[in-house]
Amino acid sequence: MRINSKLKAITAAAAIAFSSQAQAELNVFACEPEYASLTKELAPDADIYTATTAMQDPHQVQARPSLIAKMRQADLVVCAGADLEVGWLPMLLMKASNAKVRSTEQGLFYAAEHTMTLDQLDEVDRSMGDVHALGNPHMHFDPYRMVDVANALTAKLAQVDADNAAKYQAALADFKTRWKQAIPKWEAKAEPLKGKKLIAYHTNFRYLFNWLGIDQVADLEPKPGLAPTSSHLASLLKRAEQGDIMAVVIASYQSDRGAKWLGERAKLKVERLPMSIGGNEQSKDLFSLYDSVISQLLEVK
């Protein structure tokens, strides 16, 4: 009896070890840190590589050999989508020649395809600047949309790694419980920000402002993708003289040159917010990213 018990224990331990090893073999290529973090929540044992950092403009990335090599190893590619990576991801996919991640029917996942994006356009041309017909791709600052994405990403994980589908479902349930507990706390904390007005650089925080009721009254860019010009900054200074602007906001990867010019003359604080995980010391995962941006905005209120 004692020998049989030991054999059963050894067999069970071996099965657990094998299962963990199987999940560890899942290679995930994440285009942005926020989707690497979400994948980590749902597949904690997966090997996750992040192609960009919060200190990089995710619109503009070079398809360098190291990225191609990582793409070749991937079982799953997770990206924002809505053409955020259109300047580099197609080239990367072509050069990697990895059949497993060639299409969204297989191991290619675009978050924007699984939630409703803001600011979709029926028609786009170059005169409009760097705009996205499929909508604003920076959905990761809307906690409700991130639940949609988490649900869809879990289904994709189960598709590409069916043996561990139950683990992914359990991780999703745990994530959603903690996430849904955090949302009302963030909203209560951010209540004093409702109705505040900001000038920001690009529409990186469009979903954050929309969620919290903050009004971005102007953009440092004269057109999306264009750097601030002297004439445009002069027009923003005139707008700021109305006296209702709380601050000038830029993202962690953006130049502060135009923002500082405006801030100094309009006597407005320039606040650099983390664009993603790693955008500042406090932002170590999705939860702390939200904590950090709300705390920073409250400090300049």
Image (cartoon, helix red, strand yellow):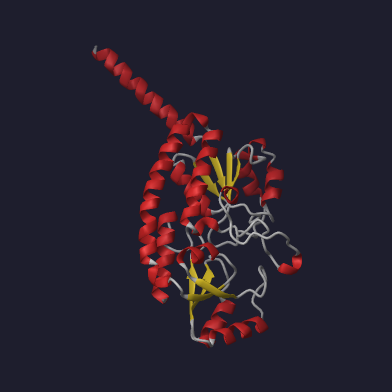
- Which residue is painted at 39% across and 67% down in the image? 190
Task: Specify the farthest residue to the top.
Answer: 1
Q: Is residue 67 left or right of residue 23?
A: right
Q: Position of residue 272 (x, y in %)?
A: 49, 71
Q: Which quadrant of the rendered structure holds the C terminus?
A: bottom left
Q: Could you tell me how many numbered marks the image carries?
A: 0
Give the image quarter of residue 97.
top right
Q: Is residue 62 visible to the viewer in this orientation of the structure? A: yes
- Which residue is painted at 48% across and 40% down in the image? 46
- Which residue is painted at 67% across and 36% down in the image? 99
Task: Work out whether 169 lies above or below 131.
Answer: above
| Foreground residue among 169 and 7 | 169
Q: Is residue 15 left or right of residue 276?
A: left
Q: Which quadrant of the rendered structure holds the N terminus?
A: top left
Q: Position of residue 29 (x, y in %)?
A: 57, 45
- Which residue is painted at 54% across and 80% down in the image? 260
Q: Position of residue 236 (x, y in %)?
A: 59, 82
Q: Is residue 104 left or right of residue 151?
A: right
